[in-house]
Amino acid sequence: MRIVNSCEITDTVAKMCIAANCHINGDIKGALIKSSETEGSEVSRVVLQSLIKNAEIADRKEVPICQDTGMAVFFIEVGQDVLVEGDTLTEAVNKGVAKGYTDGYLRKSVVADPLNRVNTKDNTPAVIHYDFVKGDKIKITFAPKGFGSENKSALKMLNPSDGLQGVIDFVIDTVRRAGANPCPPMVVGIGIGGTMDKAAELAKRALTRDITLENPDPFYADLEKTLLEKVNLLGIGPQGMGGTTTALGLNIEVFPTHIAGLPVAVNINCHATRHAVEII
């Protein structure tokens, strides 16, 4: 049994909070650069170039890419042969979020109650999804989620008879309704299957996958390509200015479901699609 002190987790999470909010991922920056070279609209090319410049300034000066530094979302894989000593893992993560958002001067956007709306002043609590796996490591994936994009996400309990076309229609309609609000070019995460809550988790998890990596299942890899093409034909474009770059990427995650159901969730992210991964 490997023992990990909770202080190490707290310090790691704090650094991840700052890094993910200030340094854009290589797959996203690469897609922005490529899109700025292929975008058909001159105005939209200028927008893409501005987004790239913004990311470069944030990276150089270590300041947030966006003023909305998001609600802290984590996917954590916990090895069955590791023991966390001190605080519980959840306590350690929340302490790390509080430290990172305070030390990094990141905007604290979380309210303690959805109706009373009193700010917690340290961006906690985080939303944490746990998986327990073999081994003695803890893999932490952090994804700060801004709500300009989160608010444009959607979930629908389709009938099995709606089939593939029903999934396609729902995804395209959700992106069309989102329009310019999520700060496109967006990244689209799609969860298919499970239950209502599982589909939503899958869609969020899909946003943490490198957009250059397609689904390992050829059927869903082809569906990702088809949907991305259809999304980019909507003409929303960078920051809603029109053109051929409405989305940089589209990832699908799936899970078995009930014979009577076909849950589909669409989680939309902004052009930055911030995330970081560390293994302890």
Image: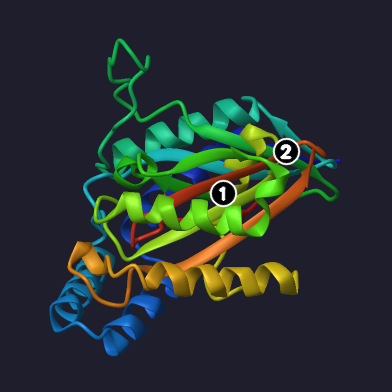
- 151 in relation to 28, above or below: above
Mark 2 belongs to which amino acid? Gly
- Res. 181 in view: yes
Upstream in the sequence, badge 2 or badge 1? 1
- Helix, strand or loop at mark 2: loop
User: What is the spatial separation of the Cα atoms under label 2 and label 1, in whole angstroms?
Assistant: 17 Å
Q: Which of the 4 image quadrants contains residue 124?
A: top left
Return the residue at label 2. 261
- List the single residue furthest toward the front: 161
| Quadrant in which the N terminus is drawn | top right
Q: Which of the 4 image quadrants contains residue 90?
A: top right
Query: Considering depth in this image, is 3 or 249 the residue closer to the camera?
Result: 249
Q: Which of the 4 image quadrants contains residue 231?
A: bottom left
Q: Identify the residue at horizontal 48%, vertical 70% (top origin).
A: 228
Circle 2: is it few (<14), some (14-19), or many (20+) Cα within 10 Å? some
Mark 1 belongs to which amino acid? Ala
Q: Identify the residue at horizontal 33%, vertical 76% (top origin).
A: 32
Q: Is residue 97 left or right of residue 220?
A: left
Residue 40 image point, x, y percent: 24, 86
- Helix, strand or loop at mark 1: helix
Residue 112 image point, x, y percent: 37, 17
- Res. 277 in view: no
Q: Is residue 126 left or right of residue 22?
A: right
Return the residue at label 1. 203
Residue 91 image point, x, y percent: 56, 25
- 47 in relation to 165, above or below: below
- 179 in relation to 160, above or below: below
Q: Identify the residue at horizontal 21%, vertical 62% (top origin).
A: 240
- List the single residue furthest toward the bottom: 37
